[in-house]
Amino acid sequence: YGQKYSSESKLEERAKDLDIETRFLQHPTSAVSDAMDELGLMGVLPNLNAVRVGQGRAFGRAMTARLDRKTSDPDAWRFGGGVGKPLEQVLQKMKSGDVVVMDLGGAMDASAWGGLASKLAQRRGVRATIMWGACRDVEEIRQIGYPVWSVGTCPRRSRNAFTFGSIEEPLTIFEVTINPSDYILADETGVICIPRDRALDVLSIVEQVALQERLLEAQVRDDNVENWDEV
């Protein structure tokens, strides 16, 4: 009986996640940010840019990881290119529906994510990767169509500059705390973290905001806005 109850609970949780995903994917990050602002929540992760024009919108559960600055750590070193040891745990753990969120402290002098990691993530059904740091192999990433957001690009590998820090633990980026399994929404405007326990509250407001936006767009199109506060 316990196993049956557990399976039913997991199915209910997946159905809830799917409903939330479907609803959030209808809205741009700007509208979701407005809704969170109405609720006094800060979720925008600034200075993150889509690697590919036309990358579209991505949504999923945050799978958090952090690499720490450490020069020439023998435990992180591996000869040649390929995947660095500090990234291995991330690649082993990521799964379908995840958005990988990696914190390298915004570093621009080395990259921990590239083409091979993107190909494996895409094969696993990972929704996107968010790099609070640099990525590399941009042409390869664009070619396969895997969604990556980063603060910039850098061809240098990270294994001589960083070591493994943590995985599936809370991250704090620009005063925004990202907990494992919080929701991440990203588009070409930027990236936003939605606390899992406030997702339905945010959706309720953003759906009101969307209705307001549609009314405003009609009035702006006809150039007949008389009172912005009445919309």
Image (tube, rainbow, N blue to C red):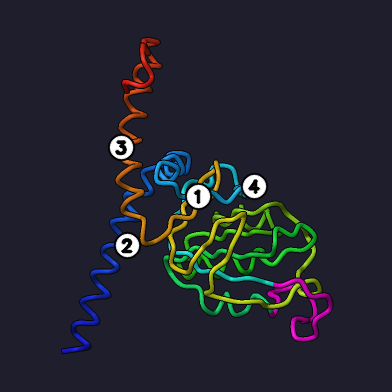
Nearer-N-terminus badge (3/2): 2
Residue located beneath label 3 in the image: 208
Instruction: Report the front residue among 46 and 218.
Output: 46
Query: Could you say whether the residue bearing mark 4 is in a helix, strand or loop?
Result: loop
Locate residue 216: give its quadrant.
top left
Q: Which is the main secondary structure of the residues drawn in magenta?
A: loop
Residue displayed at 48% across by 64% down: 62
Q: Where is residue 212? Give x, y as percent.
A: 33, 29
Q: Amino acid at mark 3?
A: Gln
- The quadrant of the image that shows the N terminus is bottom left
Check residue 42 in the rendering and tell me which mark sits there, or answer none. Answer: 1
Measured in 3D between alpha carbons, the distance from the residue under mark 4 to the one under mark 1, in whole angstroms, is 15 Å
Image: 8 above or below 2: above
Answer whether residue 9 is magenta in the image.
no
Gap between marks 4 and 2, in whole Å? 28 Å
Which stretch appears magenta? 68-85
What amino acid is labelled 2 in the image? Asp
Is label 2 in a helix, a strand or a loop? helix
Residue position marked by numbered label 4 in the rendering: 47
